[in-house]
Each structure stands twice: as C-alpha cells, then as structure tokens.
Amino acid sequence: EDNNAPVALLLHGTGAATHTWRHVAPLLAERFHVVAPDLPGHAFTQTPPQQALTLPAVAKAVRELLGAMKLQPALIVGHSAGAAVAMRMVIDGLIAPTLTVSINGAILPLQGPIGRLFLPLARVLAINPFVPPAFAAIAGLPSVARRLLDSTGSRIDAEGERCYAHLVANATHAAGALRLMASWDLQSLADDLARWRAPLLLLAGERDRTLPAAHSQRVQAIVGDAES
C-alpha cells in the first residue's frame, strides 16, 4: 500500500466491524491508502459507558481519528449505518471527499418492523447491563449467528460467518451495538439532506431485508443528482 496514495475511508455498519471490507479493501488498496476503523463501541474500539454514541458523536469521533492520523479522505465508503456517519461528516463539513459511496445506507428513518419495533426495543435493552452478556452467549452459537444473517438477507462465505459469530459472542461488542442503535436518530440527517452538494454514489443490493433498495431510491429523490 502506497502511503502517498489518496486515502479511502471505509465505515462498516451497526453490529459489524472492519472484517466487512475483507474483500473490498485489498482491491481499493491497489490505488488508495485504505483506512478502515471499527466504529466506537464495536469490535476492538471500546468506549466508556458514558460516551455518547449518537450519529453526530460517532461522526466527530471518526473525524478526530483522522485528525490524529493527519489524513484527509478522497473517498469515503459507508455500509448501512456507516453511510449515515459518512454523510453526517460531509454535511457538517468535517471532511470533504471527492466521492462518497453509500452501500445500502441507513440514511433515512427506518421503516417496517425494524423501525417500529427493534429500535425502540434496543433503547430498552441497552440500559440493562444483563442483556449484552445473555445475548452474546446465545447469539455466538453458529446456528443462531447463521439465522441472524439469514434474517438480513445476507449471503456471505464461511469466513464471514465465522467473523460475525465471533463478534456477536463478545458481550462488549454486543453492548456497543445496542448503545449505538439506542442512540440513533436519522431524522436530523434526513432533514439536512436537502443541503447535500457533494458527489454521491448510492449502491443497493436487492436482497437486503433491513435496508431495501427503495431506501436508497428515496435518498436519491431527496438529493437530486446522486448516481445510483
């Protein structure tokens, strides 16, 4: 990897980690200096319980990391919640990439069962210290991890399944993911989309059951000239 190459910042989604980019990062590394952090509260990035995991707070934390590394991304790619972080950073003027790429981005308030039921439930579960260890003990079982992936429509290889099973079996990671979901408010981001003036590429997989392609199409309708 050429450290003088333009920087590509990769941001994973809720409940995931850097392993999300295990196939993409090597390809981008042929042309970019790739930076792929674990988001606050996820995997190896642990945060104290009192640290906020709201969208603006996570965006600021990522910007502080880039500042400490003295890096300015030319490309930022976000998946799911990572796309929301990316767009929040651009709108707030924290970064100014040449291109922002959203992959099934969680950019607007979520519709369907996950928005009506799961996110409110996460707010209740996140304040109970006994929930993350119990969830991790059950979710870490290979059969349970597989069902969790199936529920999202994901079709990944055995290595990816092992990565997710290892993650969800970690109580600290589970607590971080719950805290992030409990703090997530996408309405303010949706309200600010009309101010979007930067190049944006929206990618959406048709099999995603959590964030269907229609979600990205709604974003495109708001920002106007985004490519999809």
Image: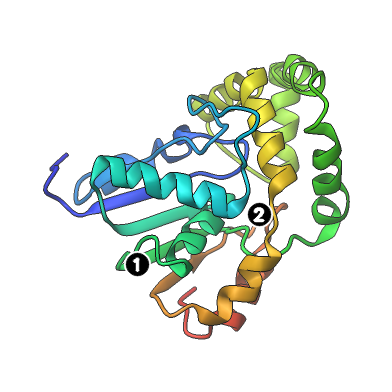
One can see residue 89 in this view:
yes
Q: Residue at 53%, 36% (x, y): give it.
A: 40
Q: Label 1 belongs to which residue?
A: 99
One can see residue 27 in this view:
no
Query: Quick check: 2 above or below 19?
Result: below
Pick the front one: 189 or 76: 189
Q: Residue at 65%, 24% (x, y): give it.
A: 168
Residue density around tag 2, few if under 14, some if 14–19, many if 20 or more, within 10 Å: few
Q: Position of residue 215 (x, y in %)?
A: 67, 67
The span from disc 1 to disc 2 (Cα, nearest Å) is: 25 Å
Query: Quick check: 202 above or below 205?
Result: below
Pick the front one: 161 or 117: 117
Q: Position of residue 17 (x, y in %)?
A: 51, 34
Q: Position of residue 185 (x, y in %)?
A: 70, 57
Query: Quick check: 92 above or below 143?
Result: below
Q: Residue at 66%, 67% (x, y): give it.
A: 188
Q: Is residue 112 left or right of residue 182?
A: right
Q: Could you tell me which secondary element the residue under label 2 belongs to?
A: loop
Q: Looking at the image, is mark 1 or mark 2 earlier in the sequence? A: 1
Q: Amino acid at mark 1?
A: Leu
Which of the numbered marks, if any, corresponds to residue 207? Answer: 2
Q: Could you tell me which secondary element the residue under label 1 belongs to?
A: strand
Q: Amino acid at mark 2?
A: Arg
Quadrant where the N terminus sits is top left
Quarter-of-image position of residue 36:
top left
Which of the numbered marks, if any, corresponds to residue 117? Answer: none
Tally of numbered tags: 2
